[in-house]
Amino acid sequence: MMSSENIPIAPTGFAPWGPPLAAGSAGTLALLAVVGLGASALAAVAIAACATLLCGWWNARQQRNASACAANKSEAAIAEALRTAYAQGGIGGLEQVFKQVMPLWSRQIETARSQTEDGIVGVTARFAAIVERLRASVIAAQQAAGGDDDSNSSVVTMLARSEADLVAVNRAMGLALQKRNEMVRDVHNLVGYTDDLKKMAVQVAEIATQTNLLALNAAIEAARAGETGRGFAVVADEVRKLSNLSSDTGKKMAEQVGIINNAITGVIGMAEKFATDDRHIIDEAENTIRKVLANFESVTSGICESSTRLRRESDGIREEIAETLVHLQFQDRISQILAHVRANLDGLHNRILQHLKENASCGTAAIDAKRWIDEMALGYSTTEQRLIHRGEMPASKPDSDEITFF
Amino acid sequence: MAKTIMIVDDSASLRQVVAIALKGAGYEVTEACDGKDALGKLNGQKIHLIISDVNMPNMDGITLVQELKKLPSYKFTPVIMLTTEAGEDKKSAGQAAGAKAWVVKPFKPEQMLTAVAKLVLP
C-alpha cells in the first residue's frame, strides 16, 4: 500500500502514484474485456482507468506538497521549485482541466453503465419471453402427445379409448347377430310342429272319411228298417254332413299348415341370408377398424416421437438457459464496479473543487493518499475489486457455487 | 397453489434473471427494487420466501431483514441474501440479522432452486 513516506518527490512517469492503481486499471480493462462488454462500456472503463491514474497523480502531487510544507524550509523551497517547474512544464493548469473534465468522465461512465444496464434489461426481458413461450410449447406438445399421464385429451389416451369403443361396438354387433341366429333356430324348430299339425289334419280327414262311410251305412240300415228307422236316417244324414264338414276342415287345416310352413321356411331362408350378410359386414367393419386404428397408431407414434425429441431438445435448451442466466448476472457486477468508480471520481472532483476554492498553496490540507485509497476500498462489493486493489489479477469468471446456509 | 417469492434487487436485469429461474420451477414471483420498496409491497400478502440483494439504495438488504423481524406476519419469512459480497464480515452481519442463506452472485439456477426448495415455507 502507498504511503506519504515512500512517495518519491520526482515525478517519474507513473511510479509516484503506485503500481496498484496502474495494475488496477489494467485489471479492470482486462476483466471487462473478458466478460464481453460493448465498445461504449469499454470506452467508459478506459476513461475510468485514466481517471484512476490521474487521481493517483493528483494524490501524489498533493502528498508531495503536504510533505514539503510539513518539513523544513529547504523542503518548502524544493516544493516551490517543483511547483514552478510544473508551471513551466505546462501542467500548472491541470486543476482547471480536472475541474471541467472529471464531471464529464463521471457522466460518461454513468451513461455507459446505464445504457449497458438498459440493454441487458431489454435482452433479459426478451429472453424471459422466449423461455416462457418455449415452456408453453413444450407443455402443449407433451399434453397433446400424452406425455402427461393424467391428461384425458392426449393422443395416446384418445387412441386407446377409441380402440376400446370401436371393439365394443363390433362386439355388440356380433352379439346381436348371435341372438338373431338363436331366434332363427327357434323358428326352425316350429317347422317340426307344423309337420305334426299337417299329420293331425290328415288324420282328421281320414276320420271324417270313416265317419262319412259309417253314416252312409247307418242310412242304409235305417232305410232297411222302414218307418221305424226314419228318425235314425235323419241322424245318419246329419252325421254324414258333419263328417263332410270335418273333412273340409281337415283339408283347410292341411292347407293352412302348408302355408305357415312355407312362410316359416321363407323367413328362415331370409334370416340365414341376412345372417351371412351381417357376418360379412361385421368382419369388414372389424378389418376397417383395425386398419384405421393401425393408421392412427402410426400417426400418434410419430407425434409421440416428435414430443420425445422436443422434450430432449427442451432439456438441452434448459441447460443452455441455466448457463446463460449465469452469464447475464455479470452485468450486475460490472454495474457495481462502474458505479463505484464513478462515485470515487465524483468524490475526488469535489475534493479538487474544495482545493481550488481555498486557493492556498501550502495552507491547503493535502489529501492523505493512503486514507483516500483505504476509504475507496471500503466501498468495494466484489472479490475482483479487492483483488485488483491488491494488485492481483482476478479470475476470468468469478466462482458461482458459493452458497452458505446459516 | 404456487408459492410466492419476492425478489429484492436494485438491478432490474438481475431481478429478471432470478425470476426466469424461479418461474421455470413453478414459483410465483413479485419484485421490489430495494428494502423500502419491498416493505411497502408486502401488503399483508403471503410471501413464502424473500431473495434480497445486500447493497441497495434507500434500504439495504441487511436492514430489510432486521425490519422484517419486527413484523409479526413476516418475522418467520426466510430470507436468502443474493449478493456480490463474499466477505465474512458481511456474511456475519447477514446471519446476525436473521438471514437463512448467503448466495454469491453469479449464482447457478439449479443451486438457487435447491436453496429455495430447502427454505421455502410450506
Image (tube, coloured by chain):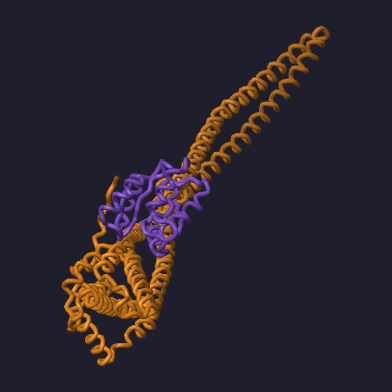
Residue A358 image-quadrant placement: bottom left
Residue appearing at x 28%, y 88% in the figure: A91
Find residue A46 and report its horizontal and vertical position in percent: 29, 79
Residue located 20% across and 80% down the image: A73
Question: Who is closer to the viewer here, A247 or A266?
Answer: A266
Q: Colour of chain A?
A: orange
Closer to us: B81 or A24: A24
> From what the image shows, is residue B67 above or below residue A327?
above
Left or right of A260, for residue A180: left
Q: How many marks?
A: 0
* Residue A381 x/y as whole percent: 30, 62
Q: Give me the residue at 46% from left, 57% from top.
A: B32
Q: Identify the hue of chain B.
A: purple
Quadrant of the drawing holding the C terminus of chain A: top left
Note whether residue B99 is visible: yes
**Position of the N terminus of chain A by quadrant:** bottom left
Q: Position of residue B101 (x, y in %)?
A: 32, 48
Which residue corresponds to the image point at 24% horizontal and 76% vertical from the top-left?
A: A69
